[in-house]
Amino acid sequence: MKKIYFIVSLAVLALFTACQDYNETNFPDYDVAAIPTNVASYTYELTNTDYGTIANTIKQPIEDKITTQNNLVSSKQAELKAAKNLTDSTRIKAELVTIKAATTDSINKLKKESLYVIATSISTNKYFVDSLQFKNYIPIVLAKKYLFGDEKSSIMTTFNFVVPYDTTKIAITNKFTLDTIAYKSMGISAVSKSFYFPTSADADFKLPIWLKQNLPYSKNADVRLIRYKLSATVNAIAIYTFDGINWIKYNTTVPTKAKYTFKSGKWEYIDTDILIGLTTGIGDFKAINVVGDQLWTWNSYNYMLMTGYLSTTKEYIDNEDWLVSPPMNLTRRTSPWLTFSHVGRYFGDVFPDNTKMKKAITIWVSTTSDGKSINPSEWTQLSLPDAFYPSGADWKFISSTPISLAAYASKDNVRIAFKYLSSGADGAAGSWEIKNVYIYEK
């Protein structure tokens, strides 16, 4: 019997292989046909209904538990209704009282779970308050609106987001954590020895009143940060500003965008920030010297500097130096762009006759470099518009024109490099200063 199964298995395998060979032989584009071609780009703005859909989906597992608790009460009520004698009725009534109390306590605890509180906030306010919320929850809506899509299809969504207040500008003396006395003064009673507001709406109503009562000498534009609780385990922070009469909760919402891509049958968030560098130091960039003794260095004024001019001897030195980025994975990107701030001066010419500068400062891209040494054959020079270059007439930083890296979308191990050249023979050894490199998905 084992031999029969083995022979049959071989026959099936041979048949499958033969079919595969037939397709590949007779249809040259057979393999290519499996490659997604319907890659679409959508835009979508969340509606008020969408926030409710998100909230209901988040709540559903907890609502199911609440339903289970209520069913216990309903079942016992049905049992009471069917009681056939006073003894059974009395016993069941006592059991029902106990079950109702336990159920009420259980449901109250369920509604204070952090996910339930978050869902209620999203449903009520129609906005998100942190990046984790829109990263994780917007795909709930997209999965219902856009059921199908080829790999790498994308959606740029617009939604309401609360702009974070810069809390570093609030003095430590103006930051409060509510204590037991504060909660009691607002009529809050302890629950299992813990003090907290029963709902966010209750906190929003009581906190401005409490601030006005306890800060009678407040001035216009005063700010206070309040830390409080919405359950024994859920912490919250609110910022209030004084308008001269009342304390107003800071709550500035702005339309915000986030991009999602279709991958393995579902929509996933794409972080539009691909690389942020040269903001506080060289970071993961590498300075690679090819010719000369001078190197790319981080200046005390917070920028990268390269120059072939030796100020001590007033010499122009031959140099070739590269500033290479860490590798980037762009396999899920469709429209990556590069910008940065820079200054270029003393290259022997100024705009618009800046031929020497254009030769001296260039940008390159590689998908094969290891980032440790320079092999020219691995790098491709980017074509840059005239507007990219600094004037050469002053030390004022300018933002480079956005540079498209679309040719490298869908590729891995992508590095960019800033290449500097100086020549003693030409008497051109200018200074190139760079900071705030930003590569992003548009």
Image (cartoon, helix red, strand yellow):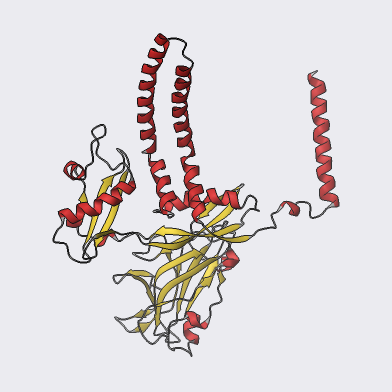
Taking the spot 43% from the left edge, 71% from the top edge, the residue there is 340
Residue lying farthest to the left in this orientation: 217
Q: Quadrant of the N terminus?
A: top right
Q: Above or below — where is 299 with respect to 41?
A: below
Q: Above or below — where is 375 with respect to 314?
A: above
Viewer-nearest residue: 323 or 10: 10
Q: Above or below — where is 205 with respect to 101?
A: below
Count of labels in the image: 0
Residue 441: give x, y in percent of width and height.
51, 63
Is residue 430 shown to the viewer in this render? no
Residue 60: give x, y in percent of width and height.
49, 39
Residue 83: give x, y in percent of width and height.
46, 13
172 left or right, relative to 31 = left
Quadrant of the image occupied by residue 275: bottom left
Taking the spot 83% from the left edge, 42% from the top edge, the residue there is 19
Is residue 207 shown to the viewer in this render? yes
32 left or right, relative to 319 = right
32 left or right, relative to 248 = right
Residue 76: give x, y in percent of width and height.
45, 20
Viewer-nearest residue: 368 or 279: 279
